[in-house]
Amino acid sequence: MKQFLLALFFSAFATLAYSQELTPGTEIPKAVFYKKAGGTFSTDQIAKGKKTLLMFFDATCGHCQKTAAAMSKRNKEFADINLILVTQDEQRSIDYFMTNYGKALLSMKNVSILQDKDHVFIPLFHPKQYPSLYLFGSDRKLIYYSSNDNDVPKFFKLIKP
């Protein structure tokens, strides 16, 4: 009986530890992603002193495509923040996605499009589904998280100073 209770305790603990999600006030997790031009990009390199909007997407996801298109249409509103898009997709899928849904974002200097080749995003950021949007304050702490593409207008309201 002792062994059964001990096994039950450890499985419950493991489930709780895995299912934790980022909550408001949580700092940007440390992670390393890859740039198209080569080299790595660490979350430690995110420019400080500005809000950061991070989007985790899949190029074939219709909701991600809708979100990227909405963000692209209002790209000028992202001028004063860091905008980081992260995906586990291959580069040609990323290129297709950005060209067709996020074209206006491509020319912006404050936008980074990154690959998660090592598959670290999911265990560190705990997204619920695609797309997942995270807004961090200039102090690098989470302000708002959503995995609902209908919440995009909320992010625009929160981005404004």
Image: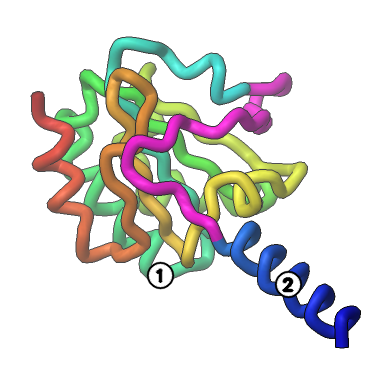
Residue 119 % position (x, y): 72, 48
Q: Residue at coordinates 14% horizontally, 52% vertically from top-left?
A: 153
Report the number of numbered marks.
Answer: 2
The residue beneath circle 2 is 9
- The quarter of the image holding the C terminus is top left
Task: Judge from the rendering whether residue 51 lies leftward or rightward of residue 97; answer left or right.
Answer: left
Q: Residue at coordinates 69% horizontally, 50% vertically from top-left?
A: 90
Residue 25 % position (x, y): 34, 36
Q: Residue at coordinates 55% horizontally, 33% vertically from top-left?
A: 29
Label 2, label 1: how far apart the Cα atoms are: 40 Å
Vertical arrangement, residue 39 with respect to residue 135, above or below: above
**Residue 94: assigned label:** none
Q: Give the label, 2 or 1, closer to the camera.
A: 2
Label 2 crowding class (10 Å Cα cut-off): few <14, some 14-19, many 20+? few
**Residue 62: assigned label:** 1
Q: Nearer the viewer, residue 124 or 32?
A: 124
User: Based on the displayed image, in which of its 4 quarters is residue 132 positioned?
Assistant: bottom left
Please tell me whether the stretch drawn in magenta is mainly helix, strand or loop: loop
Residue flagged by tag 2: what amino acid is it? Phe
Residue 137 % position (x, y): 28, 27
